[in-house]
Amino acid sequence: MEEVWGSNPHSSTSWGPKSRVYLGRVSDFGMHRDISPDTFQSHASSFGQEAALYAESRPDYPDAAVLWALEPVAGRSPLRVLDLGAGTGKLTEALLRHAGEVVAVEPDPAMLGELRRWLPEVRALGGSAEEIPLPDGSVDAILVGQAMHWFDLDRAAPEMARVLTPGGVLAGLWNTHDDRVPWVAELSRVSDRSIRTFRDWSPEGFDLAMPRFPAIEHAAFPHAHRRTAESLVATIATHSQVLLLPEADRSALDGRITSYLRSLPETAEGEFDVPLVTAVIRGVVAS
Ligand SMILES: C[S@@+](CC[C@H](N)C(=O)[O-])C[C@H]1O[C@@H](n2cnc3c(N)ncnc32)[C@H](O)[C@@H]1O
């Protein structure tokens, strides 16, 4: 499996270590090794086509991961947090437990609609990481769930730095499948790597890509997602590389995953825990 390093089509800088942005593995983009800006954009904006399924099927985030992300600004009151690329509000919901004020920003109208339906009390705005509809210095923390790899970091990094207060923190969180567990590693193979796995994940690149967030730390937190064979297939169907498959390929993939899960004692029947690791990076904005 090859990694996709530095091929962010948005990047204005040349190929090389200084311009590297972690985009995940080839699996994140199906067969597209050298992805064009159009392909990248179609993946980044694919989630809304199954917004309700996304809301129903994707995992939430563990409190320990959220608290670690917020640690550099813990104690501020009221703690003002932006959930950027908020989708249907999976991370927003966790933030409501730990922040005084939460605002969500999301570019996709269908995802935003689900968020507003699910969390009507949250201030939810249309916008993107590259154009955040908030004033300068207006939030203490920006948390990004499963979305930072879709940002054009050349534009988003200064924009995120702009809306943070001095000493504010930016954090990215990813729910990865724990492929140190053998059946999960095999699931990754059976699904043509349609799932993001922990051993594939790497924090490398973000410190290079973001001079405004010079010291990037990372941490990982155990997590789990309670699923059945059917609902796990539905979850995987919300991943961008599956959303964009032709119908026949998608249903063949569903069939392969279902047969595999039915063949295992751990997952053949009823509910089981899918082992996840929530990987987090955080960095305090440069003064
Ligand atoms: C995998 S979903 C994650 C949603 C949510 N944060 C979660 O944890 O479930 C990725 C989200 O990033 C959003 N997105 C894509 N490009 C973006 C950008 N440039 N700025 C902000 N959000 C973006 C998509 O619309 C989508 O809702």
Image (spheres, rainbow, N blue to C red):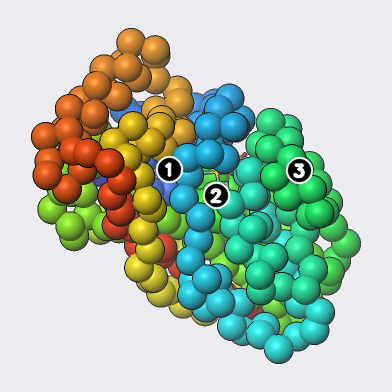
Question: Quick one: quadrant of the N terminus?
Answer: top left
Q: Work out whether residue 214 can be spotted.
A: no
Q: Earlier in the sequence, mark 2 or mark 1?
A: 1
- Residue carrying label 3: 116
- Corner quadrant of residue 195: top left
Is label 1's Cβ within 8 Å of ligand 1?
no
Three-letter code, disc 2: Ala
- Residue carrying label 2: 147
Mark 2 closeness class: few <14, some 14–19, many ≥20 residues within 10 Å: some
Q: Identify which residue is drawn at 79% across, 48% down.
A: 120
Indicate the position of residue 51 as horizontal and vertical percent values: 60, 32
SS category of the residue bearing label 1: loop
- Asked if the residue at tag 1 contacts the one at tag 3, i.e. Cβ–Cβ closer than 8 Å, the answer is no
- Corner quadrant of residue 241: top left
Question: Which residue is the extreme one toward the right?
Answer: 135
Three-letter code, disc 3: Arg
171 lies left or right of 102: left
Q: Identify which residue is drawn at 59% across, 83% down.
A: 71
252 lies left or right of 114: left
Q: Earlier in the sequence, mark 3 or mark 1?
A: 1
Q: Nearer the viewer, residue 30 or 286?
A: 30
- Residue carrying label 1: 7
Q: Is residue 237 above or below residue 69?
A: above
Indicate the position of residue 44 as horizontal and vertical percent values: 55, 36
